[in-house]
Image: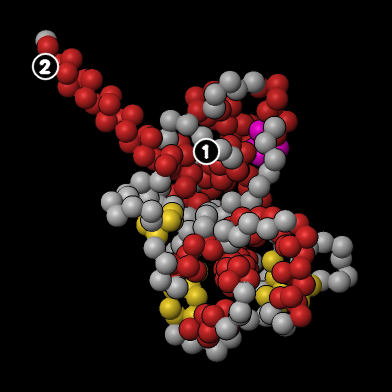
Amino acid sequence: MERFSINIILKEKEYAENVLKEPKLSKKPSYDLRIVAKYLYHVENLKPNQIYKRLVKIMEEKYYNFAISQWQDLLLNIAKHAKKRDLINIDYIPVTKNELLTIDGIKSKPMKRIAFTMLCLAKYRNMVNENNRDWINYDFKDIFRMANVTATIKEQCFMIHDMKALGLIKMNKLVNNLSVNVCYIDKTESEEVLKIDDFRNLGYEYLLYCGEKFFRCKRCGVLKRRTASNMSYCRECAEIVENQKTKERVQKFRSSKM
Ligand SMILES: [Zn+2]
């Protein structure tokens, strides 16, 4: 079974509809299924047992080598909990001038990306739960991945420690977990500079704002480094598009021979 790793989707309805349309599930099937289950509950008004049946069908269709024995407990659990949370529908996370001024003022380049990522995560948590008050609770490895920063566990701890020393964050000392309070969220409502609607590569979003060269995949929208002038698809999508073209060429060739 895959290890659960965080993946934040702002428009879950759209995401679920896409999962149902695509021939294959993503590399994080249980994450996809959790969103689809919420969709089946809130949009299609299905009951838990109906949701379970649909999830099994989706796995049979879209997951290579699906074995019910390995998935049954998880699928039952996902179906049962589908009603617990609403479908998230956030257009974008605004990042303001003052917030960027704080982040731009940090000396370390990787720390800037971590600070930007933590800011977006905290603002996201505030939008999902109005009682949140600027807290985040994610594994550091997930935060660093989203920030596009490669670092060992030791380096991660040093950087978090430095951010605390700079007064950028506070840590929850009462509970033995990784709760972080982000202290540089703009409460003055200064000018909105960035609209972040994709959490896959938040570090790149910040570097794009800094003027570095990136492109968004035409098919899945992911932000990737631009290494050539004519790039339009990420590697995964380029492969899918290429396969599609080959298929079409073969069909055309066949029909011309008839
Ligand atoms: Zn893509």
What residue lies at 23% left-to-right and 20% top-to-bottom?
250
Q: Is residue 251 visible?
A: yes
The dominant secondary structure in magenta is helix
Q: Which residue is mark 1?
A: 26
Q: Residue at x 62, y 74 (%)?
A: 108
Residue drawn at x 59%, y 40% as measured from the top left? 28
Name the quadrant of the C terminus. Answer: top left
Task: Indicate the amino acid at tag 2.
Answer: Ser
Q: Which residue is mark 2?
A: 256
Q: Amino acid at mark 1?
A: Ser
Please report the bounds of the magenta region as a residue range.
Answer: 75-79
Quadrant of residue 180 within the rendered picture: bottom right
The structure's colour scheme is secondary structure
Task: Look at the numbered disc 1 and give the secondary structure of its residue.
Answer: loop
Please provide percent x and percent y for residue 92. Answer: 46, 66
Q: Earlier in the sequence, mark 2 or mark 1?
A: 1
